[in-house]
Amino acid sequence: MTAATGEQPSGVGAATQPDYGIFLDLHGKDVLVVGGGPVAARRALGLLQHGARVHVVAPQVCEDLASLESEVHLSRRPFTESDCDGVWLIQTCTGDAQTDALVQTLADERRIWCVRAGAAQESSAWTGTTLAAPDGVLVTVNGGRDPGRARRVRDQVRACLDRTDLRRTRGGRGAGHVSLIGGGPGDPELITVRGHRLLRAADVILYDRLAPVALIEELDHAEGPLLVDVGKTPGNHPMPQTEINDLIVSHALAGRRVARLKGGDPFVFGRGTEEALSALEHGLPVEVVPGITAGLAVPAAAGVPVTSRGQARAVLLLSGHDGAESVVARTHGTPADTTLVLYMGVRHLREVATALIEAGRPADLPVAVISSGLTHSQRTVVGTLATIADAAADQRAPAITVIGEVAALSEELGTLVPPSADARHAH
Ligand code: SAH
């Protein structure tokens, strides 16, 4: 019994039984943090870095916690019983022993492990004192629930680690590493040699529907990498970008070689910047493998050279996602011999075509809309600014729209890049 709170020690026989050491994979698991001070902030950050989905409950939060607002779910109110629902783990660090004890009691009733900051003796779980070495090596010291003693042991272990051979004996994994791989425009044969090599060496592959899935399927066997579909479909975003970033980071921090396989090129409308920056912020090595971007390859496949002597002396890659106004603003003043290549937004085709005519482009300017390029479902529709909306009304994403004289060459040149046997999209 603890005099201060009068509750039962949580771990039965805690004083006599040795503690049970365990490591948790927190990735994607809901974890509750009760408390709003610097300790709670440190705990919340640590949990985030291990991939947990963190809910912080506190009536007042310190600056450090407030700065995590975009990454954690923050409830600025007192703790209530129902906050425990559905969580895997609770960390309570309110600074108030009675509240922490109450949280512990409620957690026990629900059979949820609960870590009480600064009160290992009363906790059902505790984190020990840890020492992180390179390449996922982690030593956690339990000082018999005496943190001061644990720290002394840790310092001795640290000295030993410096003399220890940390090379892997199993799995052959190196240090955590992130590669952002451009998978090319759809056909699995159009990835680079380097991209393919990194893919085969990966421990984890995160891909989406525009990536060449056939390449991944051949790796899908018992010894193969972990495959994670983070795909987005228009209007339906199964995994937010921040979650993808965190997933990449948490796997790489665990010492895995992470391949983020993307359609086309990672840095062309591919959100590669965010993924690279978030990995770099965590001190992870990042490699970007360029890919053939859809805006150049898909027109070529349909017989549309984006530059062509005498007809097109420049090419402008832009997104159609934000509709006509955005396209007009970005193409305003470009010479007539600039080919416009629109990624995304095929649903805005009518308003874009109309707005371009209103902005002074000729109504008979050729336009080609090519959907599912470099796959067996590739389909090309050619028209003019005046006719394309009706002609291509049933063209669906993914599609590239080419606006310029060169679009008309499609009828003469035809399919120039035939898809390979395995060329298909993971719809
Ligand atoms: N990073 C990618 C682009 C991602 S944006 C790249 O460099 O290619 C997604 C858009 O790319 C789609 O909406 C579509 O406009 C285009 N796209 C990608 N693959 C395509 C394909 N096989 N056929 C037609 N368009 C494609």
Image (tube, helix red, strand yellow):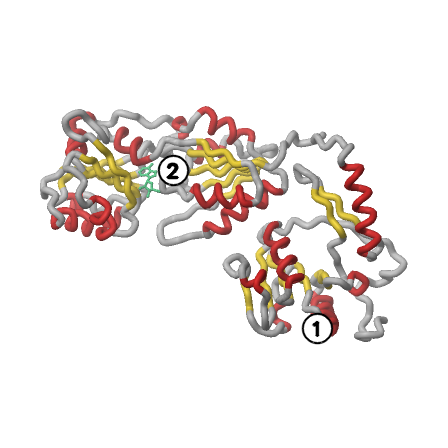
Nearest the viewer among 80 and 166 is 166
Q: Can see residue 61?
A: yes
Cβ at disc 1 under 8 Å from ligand 1: no
Q: In the displayed structure, would residue 285 be above or below residue 114?
A: above
User: Residue 48, position in %: x, y?
Assistant: 59, 53
User: Residue 235, position in %: x, y?
Assistant: 36, 54
CA neighbours of label 2 inside 10 A, class few (<14), some (14 to 19), many (20+): many
User: Residue 218, position in %: x, y?
Assistant: 50, 30
Upstream in sequence: badge 1 or badge 2: 1
Cβ at disc 2 under 8 Å from ligand 1: yes
Q: In the displayed structure, would residue 146 be above or below residue 356?
A: below
Name the residue tied to disc 1. Answer: 99
Nearest the viewer among 91 and 63 is 63
User: Residue 363, position in %: x, y?
Assistant: 10, 43
Camera-nearest label, 1 or 2: 1
* Secondary structure at numbered mark 1: helix
Q: Amino acid at mark 1?
A: Thr
Q: As drawn, is 229 to the left or to the right of 399? A: right
Which residue is pictured at 61% across the width and 74% down the height?
78
Label number found at residue 413: none
Quarter of the rendering occupied by the C terminus: top left
Dividing the picture into quadrants, the one containing residue 412 is top left
Q: In the displayed structure, would residue 189 be above or below residue 269?
A: above
Name the residue tied to disc 2. Answer: 425
Which residue is pictured at 63% across the width and 32% down the height?
174
Q: Can see residue 381?
A: no
